[in-house]
């Protein structure tokens, strides 16, 4: 059995690594020519995603990943602020949380290494055709083609494969967009470091604005203390931030703006919506060249409408099917779990225990349920942010935030008094 994978992102490379590990003939075609030139800055993998990854890659690859990842359980509890930097409350204590944070680039490069010579770079898929003999042929922009028994679209939210299978787009714009960047901790002053701390946080404001600040330290808070195995791109404590605002409010032609101008336009937009200097300090001190713009896309939350095609010799996984806003931190993990399930099904086919169409159908049924649940979870935050930009939501937000900040300050004083 030969499998053709379109897309060398996290899901496609994870699938290829797993298939190679089981001796399945697989070829991955990726349009990028440089795997380190990838969007996003860090990925959270929960226990389920890590278990799936353990099925797909050899133990030494997983060990290198854990030596390059930051343990969520070693962070302080997450915190919530308002747009003026006043604390609103804290999240739960992480305790035994098994989740880890890792650079997207680091994870992609490790998976590419596991995929080995099955990966071809600089190949853009333009479409595919099914043959009368049951094979499927992918066509590429450079005139090349590739034949296989199964074609898997792992080519992201704008997937050529999934769009052809579904007869149209598999996602929609949510109305929320983001600008993200990274700020090394040593760029902040003592007050900024003390306020942010070794934890992640979310600041919320009126008019559909919010700012997520994640903490990543794969050196000082590594999951596995094995410096000789470390492959992380991030080499010290770093804050990964993402500003959110309604698409209509964003800077003009944001994708065309260079990093420094995009950062400045984002700061200007948030300041005009009442944001104070304290929460914006981490944005202002960022590595401006790496600042990037992205749109929050989302697939349907109805599993019956997800992947609306009959099981056959072509399928898709990850964002190609269940495009997920970053607000749940589970999109990459969901793609890895898709890959693990599909590998298990393909192994069943190769062993003669299942027909190919049945195996693909079982994979897609499982993917629909899990994918729809992840999208629904991510959209809760999206809808909550957008609700602060409605006729009723904007004044309610402006009125409620000072009250929440006051209540949090009172709780803090009582706790301090009790401890004293």
Image: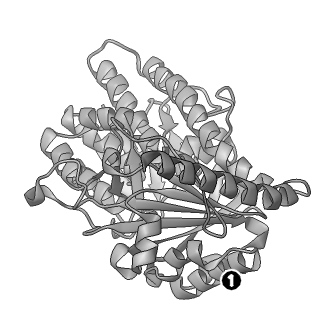
Q: Is residue 329 above or below residue 287?
A: above
Task: Tell which of 13 and 396 is nearer to you.
Answer: 396
Q: The N terminus appears in which quarter of the rendering?
A: top left
Q: Position of residue 209 (x, y in %)?
A: 70, 64
Q: Tell me what residue is drawn at x 42 percent, y 53 percent.
A: 7
Horizontal side of residue 296 vs 242, given as left or right: right
Asked if residue 94 can be seen in this view, the reply is: yes
Q: Position of residue 223 (x, y in %)?
A: 23, 48
Horizontal side of residue 383 vs 22, given as left or right: right
Q: Position of residue 149 (x, y in %)?
A: 38, 34
Task: Tell which of 161 and 36 is nearer to you.
Answer: 36
Task: Tell which of 371 and 26 is nearer to you.
Answer: 371
Looking at this view, name the residue that lies furthest to the top. 353
Horizontal side of residue 31 vs 224, given as left or right: right
Q: Is residue 192 above or below residue 28?
A: below
Crowding around mark 1 (Cα neighbors within 10 Å: few <14, some 14 to 19, many 20+) is: few
Circle 1 sits on which residue? Answer: 268
Asked if residue 170 can be seen in this view, the reply is: no
Q: Tell me what residue is drawn at x 69 percent, y 75 percent.
A: 270
Looking at this view, name the residue that lies furthest to the left. 228
Q: Is residue 56 above or below residue 295?
A: above
Name the image quarter holding residue 50: top left
Q: Position of residue 369 (x, y in %)?
A: 57, 26
Q: Is residue 260 above or below residue 85?
A: below
Horizontal side of residue 223 vs 244, given as left or right: left
């Amino acid at each position: 059995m030969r499998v053709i994978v379109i897309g060398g992102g996290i899901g496609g490379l994870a699938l290829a690594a797993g298939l190679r590990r089981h001796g399945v003939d697989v070829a991955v075609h990726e349009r990028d020519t440089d795997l380190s030139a990838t969007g996003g800055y860090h990925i959270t993998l929960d226990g389920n995603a890590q278990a799936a990854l353990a099925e797909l890659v050899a133990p030494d690859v997983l060990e290198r990943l854990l030596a390059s990842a930051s343990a969520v359980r070693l962070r302080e509890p997450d915190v919530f602020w308002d747009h003026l930097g006043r604390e609103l409350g804290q999240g739960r204590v992480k305790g035994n949380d098994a989740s880890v944070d890792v650079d997207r680039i680091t994870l992609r490069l490790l998976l590419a290494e596991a995929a080995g010579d099955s990966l071809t770079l600089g190949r853009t898929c333009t479409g595919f055709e099914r043959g009368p003999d049951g094979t499927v042929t992918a066509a590429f922009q450079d005139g090349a083609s590739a034949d296989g028994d199964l074609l898997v679209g792992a080519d992201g939210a704008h997937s050529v494969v999934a769009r052809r299978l579904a007869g149209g787009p598999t996602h929609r714009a949510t109305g929320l967009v983001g600008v993200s960047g990274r700020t090394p901790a040593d760029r902040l002053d003592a007050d900024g470091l003390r306020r942010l701390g070794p934890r992640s946080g979310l600041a919320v404001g009126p008019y559909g604005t919010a700012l997520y600040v994640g903490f990543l330290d794969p050196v000082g808070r590594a999951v596995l203390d094995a410096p000789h195995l470390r492959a992380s791109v991030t080499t010290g404590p770093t804050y990964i931030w993402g500003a959110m605002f309604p698409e209509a409010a964003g800077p003009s032609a944001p994708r065309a703006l260079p990093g420094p101008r995009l950062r400045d336009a984002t700061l200007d937009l948030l300041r005009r919506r009442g944001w104070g200097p304290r929460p914006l300090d981490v944005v202002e001190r960022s590595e401006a060249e790496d600042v990037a713009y992205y749109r929050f896309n989302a697939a349907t939350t109805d599993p019956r409408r997800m992947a609306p095609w009959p099981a056959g010799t072509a399928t898709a996984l990850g964002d190609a099917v269940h495009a997920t806003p970053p607000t749940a931190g589970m999109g990459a993990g969901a793609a890895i779990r898709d890959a693990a399930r599909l590998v298990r099904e393909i192994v069943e086919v190769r062993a003669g225990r299942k027909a190919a169409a049945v195996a693909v159908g079982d994979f897609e049924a499982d993917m629909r349920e899990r994918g729809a649940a992840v999208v629904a979870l991510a959209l809760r935050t999206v809808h909550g942010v957008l609700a602060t930009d409605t006729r009723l939501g904007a004044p309610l937000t402006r009125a409620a935030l000072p009250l929440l900040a006051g209540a949090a300050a009172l709780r803090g004083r009582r706790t301090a008094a009790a401890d004293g």
